[in-house]
Image (tube, rainbow, N blue to C red):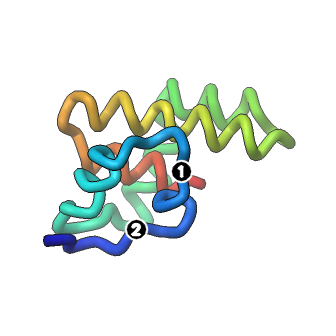
Amino acid sequence: MYRTPLPKYVRESTVLTEGEKMQLAACERLPDDAEIDDMRMHPDIRDILQAFIGDEGTRSTHLQLAAKRYLARGDVHTAWKVLLLL
């Protein structure tokens, strides 16, 4: 059923729906460290990371919202890249 254990911050997220959490849990392979680091350079993600320096709660919410957008497109791997920046 589930292949990938969800980190606590994903399991307890109020931004992500149960269906989105199930999509994440069904992922066969998590991104590696290099892929996650590369995601920091994506313009939208870089803007979020820079805009909310010192405001971890708001930054977390905006990163989760970005992950939701990738999940809506069926891009679970990229959603994981975003979530693993938290």
Instruction: Specify the quadrant of the image occupied by residue 2.
Output: bottom left
Q: Are marks 1 and 2 in contact (CB under 8 Å)?
A: no
Front position in the image: 81 or 37:
81
Q: Name above or below for residue 13 compared with residue 74.
A: below
Q: Name above or below for residue 36 compared with residue 33.
A: above
Q: Residue at x 25, y 47 (%)?
A: 76
Q: Earlier in the sequence, mark 1 or mark 2?
A: 2
**CA–CA distance between discs 1 and 2?**
11 Å
Q: Residue at x 47, y 51 (%)?
A: 83
> Where is mark 2, residue-wise?
6
Q: Name above or below for residue 10 compared with residue 71.
A: below
Percent position of residue 6, x then y? 40, 68
Instruction: Estimate how packed mark 1 is, as few (under 14), some (14 to 19) or many (20 or more) residues with alpha carbons within 10 Å.
Output: some
Q: Secondary structure at mark 2?
A: loop
Amino acid type assigned to the residue bearing label 1 in the image:
Ser
Percent position of residue 24, x then y? 29, 55
The residue sitting at the right extreme is 54
Front position in the image: 74 or 46:
74
> Where is mark 1, residue-wise?
13
Percent position of residue 18, x then y? 34, 49
Percent position of residue 15, x then y? 51, 39
Badge number at residue 26 = none
Q: How many marks?
A: 2
Amino acid type assigned to the residue bearing label 2 in the image:
Leu
Quadrant the N terminus occupies: bottom left
Instruction: Specify the quadrant of the image occupied by residue 3.
Output: bottom left
In the picture, measured across the screen, residue 16 lies left or right of residue 58, that is: left
Quadrant the C terminus occupies: bottom right
In the picture, measured across the screen, residue 21 lies left or right of residue 73, that is: right
Q: Residue at x 28, y 37 (%)?
A: 71
